[in-house]
Amino acid sequence: ASSAPAPVAEKVVLSVDAASQWYWDGQPLDKAALHARLAELGRTAAQTELHLYADQSTRYADLAEIMSVASVAGLGKIAFATVPAPRR
């Protein structure tokens, strides 16, 4: 007997700009709201993939903090996405 395929994980795009402003699927939010959303996502949909886009000037400490919050929330699928440099 075959089992049903596992559901495809949802994806959330997290991004941070040069001014340390965070975005959740394109919508700005402050760090406290970001922490709360990650915790909720961990409780309700832990298989969700986080795609993290960061401005090249983003401080590593900011990225490490969000990765830690996501990990504690039970979110283990984090992908760093890059945007190619423009052609000259």
Image: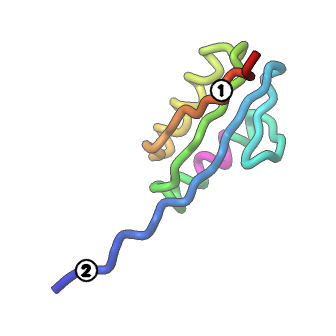
Q: Which residues are magenta?
A: 35-39
**Residues under numbered marks 2 and 1 in contact, where contact means CB atoms less than 8 Å apart:** no
Residue located at (71% from left, 35% from top): 15
In the rendering, which numbered label is found on residue 3?
Answer: 2
Residue located at (66% from left, 45% from top): 13
Give, as a three-letter code, the residue at label 2.
Ser
What's the image's color scheme?
A: rainbow
Q: Residue furthest front?
A: 88
Task: Decide whether residue 36 is among the magenta residues.
Answer: yes
Callout 1 secondary element: loop
Q: Quadrant of the C terminus?
A: top right
Q: Quadrant of residue 58?
A: top right
Q: Where is 68 relative to 73, above or below? A: above
In the rendering, which numbered label is found on residue 84?
Answer: 1
Residue 55 x/y as whole percent: 72, 22
What secondary structure is the stretch in magenta mostly built from? helix
Residue located at (25% from left, 80% from top): 3
Q: Nearer the viewer, residue 10 or 85?
A: 85
Q: Nearer the viewer, residue 43 or 64?
A: 64
Q: Mark 2 Cα within 10 Å, few/some/many (few <14, many 20+)?
A: few
Callout 2 secondary element: loop
Q: Quadrant of the N terminus?
A: bottom left
Q: Nearer the viewer, residue 79 or 83?
A: 83
Q: Quadrant of residue 77?
A: top left
Give, as a three-letter code, the residue at label 1.
Pro
Quick check: 66 left or right of 24? left
